[in-house]
Image (cartoon, rainbow, N blue to C red):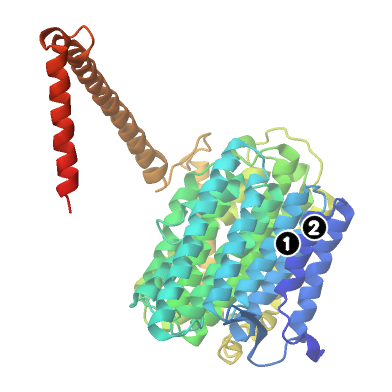
Amino acid sequence: MIEALYDVSPAWPVIIAGLLAAAFPFHTARKGLALIAPVLALGLWFNAPSGDHVGGLIELGGFTMETFRFDGLSRIWGLIFIIAAFINGLYGLHEKDRIADAAGLIYAGAGLGAVFAGDLLSLFVFWELTAISSVFLIWGARNNAAYKAGLRYLAIHVLSGVLLLTGAVIRASETGSWAFDETLSIETLGGFLIFIAFGIKCAFPFLHNWLQDAYPKATITGAVVLSAFTTKLAVYALARGYAGTDQLIWIGAIMTAFPVFFAVVENDLRKVLSYSLNNQLGFMVVGIGVGTELAINGAAAHAFVHIIYKALLFMSMGAVLLRVGTVKASELGGLFKSMPATTVFCLIGAASISAFPLFSGFVAKALTLAAVAQEGHWMVWLVLVFASAGVLEHSGIKIPYFAFFSHDRGHRVREAPVNMLMAMGMAALICVYLGVNYGVLYELVPFPEAALHYEPYTFDHIVGQMQLLLGAMFAFAFLVRMKWYPDEKRGVNIDTDWFYRRFLANTLNWCHAMFSRLWASIGNVLGGVRRRTGGKLFEVFSPIGALSRDIPSGLLAIWTSALLAIVLLIAYLAP
């Protein structure tokens, strides 16, 4: 170990690489930075001292910012963020967009910075940096829909940062502490505001629409990068500050269930993956709400494997979008003939997210389900089982089926670029490796002692999971065969964002029209009054008016002098 680097956060080489990438005009140099920076960050991660460590102190205006807290919770999140940054850099090697290259690195570095932040002020700085940098991955698509979605995305995430800072200030004024730890509580105003800030970024129900709005409109590589950091950073923040908060149990249960219904009827396959992402986040939120060591381990392990297999699915759909030009289920099918490697990688991602035995999702999701059952939350457990069947239907089956095997639309395209295949292959290898060698994953979780005593490959667990999966597969096949499965239809499905994208927008437009009409009416009335009053005054005071005609000039002069005297007297007597 190099003691001089103990206090250097792995975030800094990635952020600095992003700033350099913004200045470098050479494509090769930028891509080199995208691969080298995560390797340097990994070196700093390995170099960190064992046990809990707080360092990277920065004095700013009398305040000490802690930029490198390394403990059991930040360790696992830091590692998966570094791995994701490397895979994302490899996946985007073929692209030549300087802004996207820089934004991707700064975004990944900001995510790492937030994970290792030891106080709420440091967390806020990196929290806002993730929002500002990531929006360029949406705008990089360079179309009007992406521009509008990016504005909405930026607005909601800046609001999250404002709530975080406001809550932190209130909490500091009440307690005198800026510490980012498990003492946060929704019972206080400051703690509640911070909780909502985390909930926005975690896509809580009714706060989730930014995710399905923005991710499908991002660039091909941008959607992959976005899927890795934002929401999982929020899961980390909840695990750090609100573990054991009972309200999270039902919030998470709702998150697992409602996306299933939207994903079934959605035509855009990247939007299906966005709903699926929301579903998977729910499992993690439930684990954090339960709050036991096994449950926190489950949330952390699930976040780790989810980043990989969700990126794999987004990468496979990105390859399809690159070659075919669309990811609409109604326009795809038969691509296994042209893109066999991408098909295989997509199937591995689908098996992982569906929690098939021998794949990473199986060994991670099992921890959360076991923890929920141990604490007696049987109703929530049943919701999670239903959601598990749902995720198989919309991500495990629908994505590969409609993209690669359904009606052959006649697309004969080239296989994905080599760098894309390499990135997908690396992610697929991790999915299989961790599914078989799950002890490696269990050693990384915050409470390894609790995890290492858990055995996922029991007869009951395997048989139960396979019954669930085979039942869901049979149901899908039966519905398709009977032509009862919802047809893939061109169109846009509106979620609860209808309230602000349609209802609120129409309400504001109506109010604007009514105000304009009212103002115009008032203007007409005032104009009439002004014209009539002006005419009367002209008749009285003009040189040819009544006053000039009827009153002699000498009398008018006397009257004017009297008025002036009265004014002067009042001014003199005034205090």
Q: Residues within 10 Å of mark 1 (few under 14, many from 20)?
A: many
Does any portion of residue 481 appear in the rendered image?
yes
Q: Which of the 4 image quarters holds residue 80? A: bottom right
Classify the position of the N terminus by image quarter.
bottom right
Tell me where residue 389 appears, x and y as whole percent.
49, 61
- Residue at image x 17%, y 28%? 561
Does any portion of residue 366 appear in the rendered image?
no
In this view of the protein, which residue sits in the foreground, 376 or 247? Answer: 247
In-image side of 567 versus 454 (left or right): left
- Read off the residue under disc 2: 21
Q: Amino acid at mark 2?
A: Ala
Residues under labels 1 and 2: Cα distance? Answer: 8 Å
Tell me where residue 81 appears, x and y as whole percent.
68, 70
Q: Residues within 10 Å of mark 2 (few under 14, many from 20)?
A: many
Tell me where residue 333 appears, x and y as whole percent.
66, 39
Whether residue 91 is situated above or below residue 547 in the rendered picture: below
Q: Amino acid at mark 1?
A: Leu
In-image side of 459 versus 36 (left or right): left
- Read off the residue under disc 1: 105
In this view of the protein, which residue sits in the foreground, 54 or 383? Answer: 54
- Residue at image x 81%, y 47%? 96
Mark 1 in CB contact with mark 2 (< 8 angstroms): yes
Whether residue 531 is situated above or below residue 227 in the rendered picture: above
